[in-house]
Amino acid sequence: MSLRFLLGLAAILPALASPAHAQAPQAPTSYAVISLVGDRLDVVTYQPKIGTLMDANSHSVLRFSEDLLDTVALRAVNRAMKATLPGADVALLAATEPSTFADQSAFFEGDHVKLPREVAEAVHRENVATLVLLTKHRGEAKLTVSDGYLGGGKLEGLGFYIDSNMPMESADKQHHSYGFIAPFVYVDVSLVDVASGRLLRQTTIKATETIMSADNPQGADSWGAMTAKEKVAALSGMLSENLAAAIPHLVDPSRPERHAD
């Protein structure tokens, strides 16, 4: 599964593989942006819990050789910031060291943010006042359906939740099947004062889309209900749409807050 999926990514989105590393600016910039959410996808397969409060689901990791989805996120943030703060200079940064993506909850201690070494060095080279930092959010699985939510256990970052046994009904109640796949985006977006390391503001994106296994033309396999192209498009679209909604209020709290659908 992993090999076919990753090969599909390489064929589908070559344009997104362009480097996101910022060039050294000629003058101090106002903001830097870095995304640390796209190094891997978490494929979560539902497993019923029996007598435990622990997350019983199985988790398979799909790793990326290139920063495709982080590049999607950077471009979405850049567009939103340019529209919100037309005069601001924005430096787009990319991380390369695997350790930078690990244990992201340890970055935050109350209202203080301790940046990993690679990020701290890059931000100080850019001589910026403020950092927009995208990190993986970990939270309860709440997968949107027409009449509420499904799911159990925890989700973190970007990925897909699979349940092959859940009875499902289409929105028009004309189609019934068992199982679904749900792409998810669980991301924290933080505004950080670089000089003090203080967390100025933070917003959390928890976006999901639930797709019935019956949509798989090859049979009832939940993973196959979306093609590789559709999987990438779903995560890219969810990232872009929700960041477009979140960023204006994050960087300019005087603006009315707009929520993505």
Image (cartoon, rainbow, N blue to C red):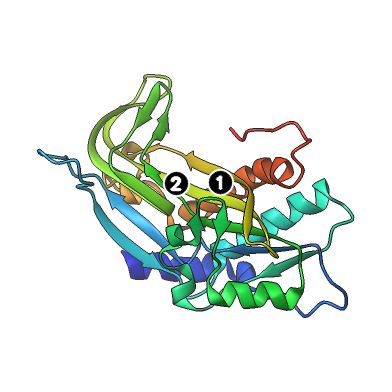
User: Is residue 19 in view from this perspective?
Assistant: no
How far across and how far down the image is residue 53, in percent?
A: 19, 41
Give the mark, 2 or 1, whose residue is nearer the N terminus: 2
Residue 37 lies, in percent from the top left, at: 50, 60
Mark 1 Cα shell of 10 Å, populated few (<14), some (14-19), many (≥20): many
Q: Which numbered circle lies on residue 11?
A: none
Residue carrying label 1: 238
Q: CA distance from mark 2 to mark 1?
A: 8 Å
What amino acid is at disc 2? Phe
Q: Regarding mark 2 in the picture, which secondary structure is present there?
A: strand
- In the figure, residue 87 lies in which quadrant? bottom right
Q: Which residue is mark 2?
A: 184
Type of amino acid at the residue the image marks with label 1: Met
Specify whether 248 is left or right of 52. right
Question: Does dot 1 land on a helix, a strand or a loop?
Answer: helix
Q: For the point 69% across and 33% down, which residue is it?
A: 257
Say which quadrant the C terminus sits in.
top right
Residue 161 drawn at (x, y percent): 34, 46
- Seen from the viewer's position, the closer of residues 244 and 199 is 199
Instruction: Answer whether labels 2 and 1 touch (C-beta < 8 Å).
Output: yes
State whether residue 35 appears in this view.
Answer: yes
Residue at (33, 63) in percent of width and height: 61
Q: How many residues crowd around disc 2 within 10 Å: few (fewer than 14), some, or many (20 or more)?
A: many
Which x, y percent locates residue 59? 27, 56
Residue 143, placed above or below residue 243: above
Task: From the viewer's side, name the closer residue of 61 and 227.
Answer: 61
Badge count:
2
Q: Quadrant of residue 203?
A: top right
Residue drawn at point x = 49 percent, y = 78 percent? 97
In the rendered view of the protein, which quadrant contains the N terminus?
A: bottom left
